[in-house]
Image (cartoon, rainbow, N blue to C red):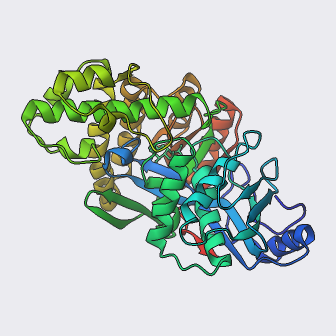
């Protein structure tokens, strides 16, 4: 973050924080001090906390996230030549990528997101140069969507600097693919809420058929985001564990469809079998783990359709979790409907119970919690939260607590006591905006 700049206030433990937009003056000064000219455009892309609907998006099943006041700001101006240079007050390194053939710099962990964004803009602005500055207050690597905020912000700022008109839907679509190039075969939740969120409301997102609706955060409900102390490295083990489960969900879909004689459409997603009669019973009959080769052999399906990942090859022989992954995803989708209904009815204890059930399912079935996340959630519940669960991909990172405003200070204190912090209140905030 820019030293001494009037920026988003850092939330203080145990207090309700009023939020403001990042200061454009501070961004412009930092940009001009580095490049000797002002930016042509600057965008603020928020982080997000997913309330419920975890690991459902890549199965085209619904999610219910909020955008938060913390985020990433990207400022850009066009440049002569075909090089895109970037520097950041948050992230180490200063990548310089050739626009025509952007390849990430292995020594700079955030450069794959820049490279992915450039690839997804190549058809609109081939061989253009640009200068970028990235600032923000969103913790990286923990399930608050820093990678998507960065990717969305870079795409929006570059398009504006190059005078390329992109609709918000186009920004989302290109940002999703850009991020898949960076390695994780993710769904579209993060990019969609980052672009379309509205202050004071959660965003219910459906993917098939596509739809969005606001769900107001009722009075008496406040949120805390708390770090577990375990990093969830998107470039390493967490990415592999995530992609294995994406393939596991596809294998489960193909086997269930085969069992009931349903013709599959592409891409293969659990959404296609979610409404099948007695699907719960059928899921319980699936194998615990299976490789794509074994599955494709058993049901006469093109193996490439099961394992094809934007980011590259997937080991066909690797046994991936199938039964429990499918069970979690299908039940989690039902919990999204129930949680939305609970919010509409103002039934906050019921909403909290659903968060707890979601966490139990992510731990027991999906297998993406950690002992530190479990301890953190237990501590926040004990301190008065309606409910608490890991948020985002898991395998480490952040947890969310939903609590009455009167319990927020105690929940934050308990979170810091259990995991060391940071822990801070977050508010349902607005989406991508031009500064
Ligand atoms: P994180 O890693 O928390 O930003 C990831 C995916 C989402 C979704 C969640 C799990 C990316 C960019 N995002 O979020 O699409 O699948 O995990 O619900 O990988």
Q: Is 295 left or right of 427, judged from the image as shown?
A: left
Q: Is 111 left or right of 403, judged from the image as shown?
A: right
Residue nearer the viewer, 125 or 175 = 125
Q: How many marks?
A: 0
Q: Position of residue 307 (x, y in %)?
A: 37, 34
Residue nearer the viewer, 2 or 21 = 2
Q: Position of residue 72 (x, y in %)?
A: 68, 60
Residue nearer the viewer, 296 or 247 = 296
Residue nearer the viewer, 8 or 237 = 237
Quarter of image, res 97:
bottom right
Taking the spot 51% from the left edge, 30% from the top edge, the residue there is 240
Image quarter in which the C terminus is found: bottom right
Taking the spot 21% from the left edge, 34% from the top edge, the residue there is 254
Image quarter in which the N terminus is found: bottom right
Q: Is residue 149 something one can see in this rendering?
A: no
Q: Position of residue 124 (x, y in %)?
A: 55, 72
Q: Is 244 left or right of 280, judged from the image as shown?
A: right
Where is 288 relative to 62, above or below?
above
Quarter of image, res 107:
top right
Where is 204 relative to 280, above or below?
below
Q: Position of residue 299 (x, y in %)?
A: 17, 26
Q: Is residue 224 something one can see in this rendering?
A: yes
Taking the spot 54% from the left edge, 47% from the top edge, the residue there is 181
């Amino acid at each position: 973050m820019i030293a001494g700049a009037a920026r988003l206030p850092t939330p203080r433990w145990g207090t309700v924080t009023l939020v403001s937009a990042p200061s454009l003056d501070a961004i412009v000064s930092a940009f001009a001090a580095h490049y000797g000219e002002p930016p042509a455009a600057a965008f603020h892309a928020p982080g997000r906390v997913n309330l419920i609907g975890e690991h459902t998006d890549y199965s085209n099943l619904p999610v219910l996230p909020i955008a938060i006041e913390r985020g990433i700001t990207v400022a850009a101006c066009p440049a002569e030549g075909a090089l895109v240079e970037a520097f950041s007050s948050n992230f180490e390194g200063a990548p310089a990528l050739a626009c025509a053939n952007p390849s990430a710099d292995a020594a700079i962990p955030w450069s794959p997101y820049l490279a992915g964004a450039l690839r997804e803009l190549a058809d609109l602005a081939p061989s253009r140069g640009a200068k970028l500055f990235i600032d923000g207050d969103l913790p990286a690597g923990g399930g608050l969507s820093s990678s998507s905020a960065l990717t969305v912000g870079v795409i929006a700022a570059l398009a504006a600097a190059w005078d390329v008109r992109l609709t918000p839907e186009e920004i989302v679509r290109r940002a999703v693919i850009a991020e898949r190039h960076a390695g994780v075969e993710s769904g579209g939740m993060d990019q969609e809420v980052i672009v379309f969120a509205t202050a004071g409301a959660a965003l219910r997102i459906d993917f098939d058929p596509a739809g969005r609706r606001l769900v107001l955060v009722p009075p008496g409900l406040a949120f805390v985001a708390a770090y577990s102390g375990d990093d969830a490295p998107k470039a390493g083990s967490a990415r592999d564990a995530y992609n294995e489960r994406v393939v596991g969900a596809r294998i489960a879909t193909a086997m269930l469809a085969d069992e009931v004689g349903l013709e599959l459409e592409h891409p293969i997603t659990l959404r296609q079998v979610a409404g099948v009669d007695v699907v719960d019973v059928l899921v319980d009959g699936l194998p615990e783990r299976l490789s794509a080769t074994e599955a494709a052999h058993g049901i006469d399906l093109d193996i490439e359709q099961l394992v094809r990942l934007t980011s590259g090859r997937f080991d066909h022989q690797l046994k991936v979790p199938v039964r429990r992954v499918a069970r979690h995803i299908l039940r989690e989708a039902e919990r999204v409907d129930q949680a939305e209904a609970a919010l509409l009815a103002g039934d906050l204890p019921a909403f909290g119970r659903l968060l707890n059930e979601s966490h139990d399912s992510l731990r027991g079935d999906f297998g993406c919690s950690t002992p530190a996340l479990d301890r953190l959630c237990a501590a926040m519940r004990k301190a008065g939260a309606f409910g608490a669960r890991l948020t985002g991909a898991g395998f480490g990172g952040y947890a969310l607590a939903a609590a009455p405003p009167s319990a927020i200070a105690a929940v934050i204190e308990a979170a810091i006591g259990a995991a060391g912090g940071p822990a801070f209140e977050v508010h349902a905030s607005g989406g991508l905006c031009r500064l």
